[in-house]
Every structure is written in structure tokens, then in C-alpha cells.
Amino acid sequence: MEVATRTIYAIGGEAAPGQEPVFRNQTARVFNSGFLEIFSKVHPIVPALIYVPVVAATLWFGLARVALPQAVLAIVGGLFFWSLLEYTLHRFLFHLPRRGPVSTWTYLTFHGVHHMYPDDTLRLVMVPSVSLPLAAVFWAVFSALMPDGVWQAAFAGLVAGYLNYDYSHWATHFLKLPRAGLLAPFARILKGQRRRHMRHHFADHDLGYGVSTGFWDHVFRTADPALRR
């Protein structure tokens, strides 16, 4: 992968213009500060290394405290909640309207660079500097609002949903599955996700906010009408 030489957004520097160019098969330095730059990139294996043990542990604790049907309902609820959270974060935070330096910095730092450099493999999954604080917040909220056992199972579902989102996003940009044999059903699912997500990237940023699922785009009327044809 070719390395781009210019800095996209430096703290204390000048923001990129409103209509960002798109650079294919390249990566870029985001911050002038080397310390900050470390936290803007992550290898795709890192979320699994951090959160698969979290899912396993919270699921084990949940199943040890509540009956299986109750745990299953909690897990499904956590997955469903994540799907809505995924849509909400992508639409309202990652695509925050740029009305000044703070909103511009937020957009570019959280998501804008990904739209400019969609093939950068070190910016396809959420960095731990964002995912860990979010996980801590929902750990605290779930444990405060739900009974013991239920909240662990629900949290396991939430984190499993997050991992599905991260790796769905990575796969839409990076993975090419064979369209025959045992992987054919997964290839068809991935093809639909890729088409929806690439339309979001290259046709209309204001449509297709769902990555792992397009369900909420239909609910909130942000589904791309071109995908129905």
C-alpha cells in the first residue's frame, strides 16, 4: 500500500476542505503529533483480542446466574441495541455536520479520514481509544439498570454486535469471498453489505448508515433507493 505524505488534520493546523478528495489504495498521517497518531490506527486483529474474552466472560457469568431462556433474550436484546447504537453513532457522530473547527475536527478525526482513505487497512475497525470508553459507559449503564445475570448476558450481546459491526466493515472493504462452495451464502451476504456500504462511500454520504445491517436505514428512511432496483 502506498503511503501518502501529507497530514490530513493536524491539531492546531488547518482543516481539510468541505469536499474531501478520495485517495484509493493509500494511507495517510492524520496528526502532526506522533503520540496522537499512534491512537488513530489499529490492526484489525486488535478488537478480537480485546473483546472476545469480554464476550466469553460476561456470557459465562450471565449463564451462571439466570436461566438459559432469559439469557438468550438478554443476548438478543444486546445485539438489537447495538444495531441501533451502530446506526446512531454513524449517522449523528461520525457524520457530524461541520459548522466550525470543533465539529470539523470531530468529523475528520472519527470518520472523515476513512472516507478520504477508504482502503487504509489500519483504519477499518474502531480504535480502542474510542471503543474502550464506550464499552465502559455501557458496562456501567447495563449493570446499574438490569438485574445481575441479565446485564452480563445483554452486555455480551452488545459487544458481540460491536465485533460483528467491526468485522463486517473490515470485510466490506478488504475481504473477497469465493462465490461457490461452503462460503457462497456468506459471500452473498457480504455482497449486499458491500453494495450498500460502497454506495454510502461513493454515491451519497447521507444514506446507508447501517454497516452490519440495513434495518435501521429502512426504519428511519435513510435507505438508498438505488439499492431497490
Image: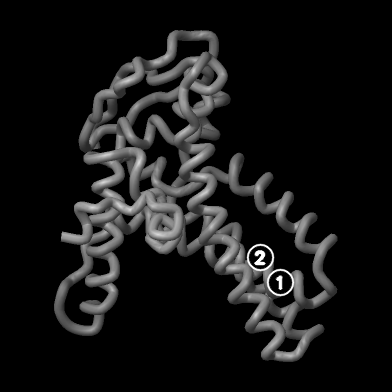
Q: Percent x, y for residue 117?
A: 30, 34
Q: Is residue 172 left or right of residue 76?
A: left
Q: Is residue 83 left or right of residue 51?
A: left
Residue that sits furthest to the top in the current view:
13
Count of numbered circles in the view: 2
Q: Quadrant of residue 158?
A: bottom right
Which disc, if any, is residue 58?
1
Find numbered disc 1 in the image and state the secondary structure of the residue it sits on: helix
Q: CA distance from mark 2 to mark 1?
A: 6 Å
Residue type at tag 1: Thr
Mark 2 highlights which residue?
54
Q: Percent x, y for residue 165?
A: 46, 58
Residue type at tag 2: Val
Q: Percent x, y for residue 70?
A: 71, 85
- Which residue is at 38% across, 18% downward? 7
Name the one closer to the observer, 221 or 77. 221
Mark 2 and mark 1 in contact? Answer it, CB < 8 Å.
yes
How is the structure coloured here? one colour
208 is higher (above) or lower (below) than 148: above
Q: Is residue 171 left or right of residue 195?
A: right
For the C terminus, the image quarter is bottom left
Q: Percent x, y for residue 119?
A: 28, 41
